Structures are given as C-alpha cells and as structure tokens.
Image: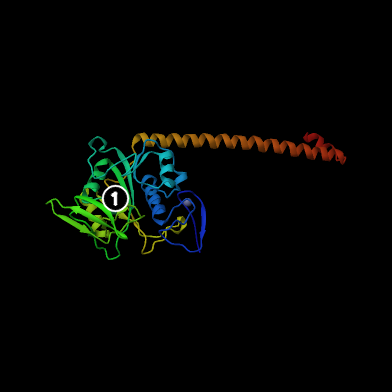
Amino acid sequence: MVSFTCNICGAFNRVESFATEPASCKCGSNVRLRALMHLLSMELFGYSLHLPQFPKLKAIRGLGMTDKESYADILADKFDYTNTHYEREPQFDFTECHPRLAGMYDFILSADVLEHIAPPVERALEEVCRLLKPHGFLGVTVYCTPSDNMREHFPELNEYRVVPLGNASVLINRRRDGSLEICEDLVFHGGSGATLEMREFGMSGLGAKLIAAGFREVHFLTENLPDIGVLFDQDVSQPLMARKEKFVMEASAQSQLVGLWREAQTQIRRERDRAEQLAGRIRLASESRWVRLGRKLGVGPNFMNME
Ligand SMILES: [Zn+2]
C-alpha cells in the first residue's frame, strides 16, 4: 500500500498496487509527471509546492511539448504558458529554427518526447536552448536504459514513411544518397505513428548532449519523494532539469509575487479583524447571558454592576 498526495491535483491517494508508469491518481498523473512538476516548482520557487498552490505569475513564460491537460491547464492558468503539439495546433516543431522566439522562455517542458523527435535530436536540443532566456531551464522526462547505452534506431532518416505491412508496420526511408532502406521491429509508444521510438537514451549520453547543446548544468532526479508519490523503479522515465544559468526570477515576475504577497497580507488582516469582531460579539452575548441568568437566580448586584 502506498499513500501520497498528488502534487498535480492535490488529491490524497492510497494505492494498493503501485506502479510507476500507469496513472496512480484520478487526475491521470504518474511518477514521472509528478516528478517533473516537483522539479519545476523547485527550480522556480525553491520549494516543492503542489501545482494548485503555485502563485499566479503571468510574467513567467513557459512552453510545453504535448503536455498532458491535467497539468498543462493549470500551468496555463498560473503562467504565460503555451502547450504545443507536433501534429496539431498550436503546432510547434522543435527541429526548426524560430529566430523571433529566441531567448523568450523561462522554462520549456518535454515529458517523454525526446525519444520521438526525428534525428538529429541535437538540433532540437540546441533550438530549445536558444528559445530559453539566459536564466531559463528545460524540464525533461525520458526513458534511459539501465545499461546507460544510447542507440539511434534510424541514423540515416531522411524522407520516410511508416506503412502497415501484414500485422505490423515498417519504416521506408530514402537516405540522402537516394538509396532506400526498410526498417522493421518498430517500437511505438501509445500506439500511433507520431509516437514511433526513434532512439534510446542513456543518462550519461543524454547529459553530454544537453551540455553540448549549450546547457551548463544537468541535474537528474534520482531520489524518491514518497510524500508526492514519486517512487522510482526500473520502468520509469528519468526526470531531469537542464539549466543554462541558475534560474532567476525577472523583476516583472518578482513584482507580481510581491503584489500577491501584499494582497495575502491584506486578506489576512481583514480576516483577523473580522474574527476579532466576531469574538467580541460572542463575548458580549455570553456575558449578557450570564447576567440574565444571574438576575433570574437572584444573584446580586455584582452581575448588575458588570452590565
Ligand atoms: Zn492527481
């Protein structure tokens, strides 16, 4: 039996047979998504807040790669955050160059996407780094092999199509030199052509690629966080944070945060005043009740004096 509070929806869960990849909360969250939100919170605020507790800071800009609605909707409410997709609107292809968006984002999230990006994946990592502000960061979950080996399944991928053949699918690729190749034994995640596994990562290789793409520091989350239901096993995708520089909240976001803090202070003061007034009224009411009782019992002038 595993008990935890989901840091995405705030629900308390008691799960009899706990596994890392299947959803273990009614909001659909699993270990890697809760771990990713923990990393995001630690990076932004230095605390592991639950997502609904995040302050609303529209000065913070984020970008998602096909993030799940369960947390994407909350992020869109809290920040200036856009979830993007490879195949539908708002469409965004990280393997292309977006010079006008360079240096615009505080954070980018990539939950189990890097293994599906067409090669070379280095191009997408460099583009992510370019899109981030100088103090921005990339939050990732991606499966890493226990053997720490990296394997590119289709290193010569160029013009290609996945087509059904018999009971399975094959990939037909026209290499750059014009020759054709047919690849079998394709691995799909989630079942559709868009989720074809292009590669397997190892932690060391992935870390090195992120550094080569322009990140200065890569932090892999490996410790369990039982309070929020993050318990790792062999099956789980590896959560990590890749930083350019250590995250610093810009002045605009800081002043929004101070604004929220002041609002909260005013609210607390107002509630305290209201509580004091209420307590005063209760005290008066109970005193007069005792006074009345005193009169009824004929207990003397002391009570009368109090009135
Ligand atoms: Zn949940």
Number of numbered discs present? 1
Q: Is mark 1 on a helix, strand or loop?
A: strand
**What residue is at 75 percent from the left and 38 percent from the top?**
287
In this rendering, would 40 be left or right of 154? right
Q: In the image, residue 231 lies at what x, y percent?
A: 42, 61
- Measured along the vertical axis of the image, is residue 133 above or below residue 189? above
State which quarter of the image contains the C terminus.
top right
The residue lying at 27 percent from left, 62 percent from top is 185
- Residue farthest along the bottom direction in this orientation: 147
Taking the view exactly as shown, the residue that stands out farthest to the right is 298
Q: Which amino acid does label 1 sit on?
A: Ala
Residue 238 picture quarter: bottom left
Badge 1 local density, few (<14 within 10 Å), some, or many (20+)? many
Question: Residue 32: x percent and y percent?
Answer: 38, 55
> Who's the residue at 52% across and 54% down the image?
12
Position of residue 3 relative to residue 61, above or below, is below
Q: Residue furthest front?
A: 166
Q: Can you give x and y, in whole percent of width and height, for residue 27 in the image? A: 47, 50
The type of colouring in the image is rainbow
Residue 239 lies in what quarter of the image?
bottom left
Say which of 159 and 267 sits in front: 159
To which residue does mark 1 refer?
242
Nearest to the observer: residue 289 or residue 31:
31
The image position of residue 265, as x and y in percent, is: 50, 36
Q: Where is residue 58, by image quadrant?
A: top left
Ligand 1 has an atom within 8 Å of the beta carbon of the residue at disc 1: no
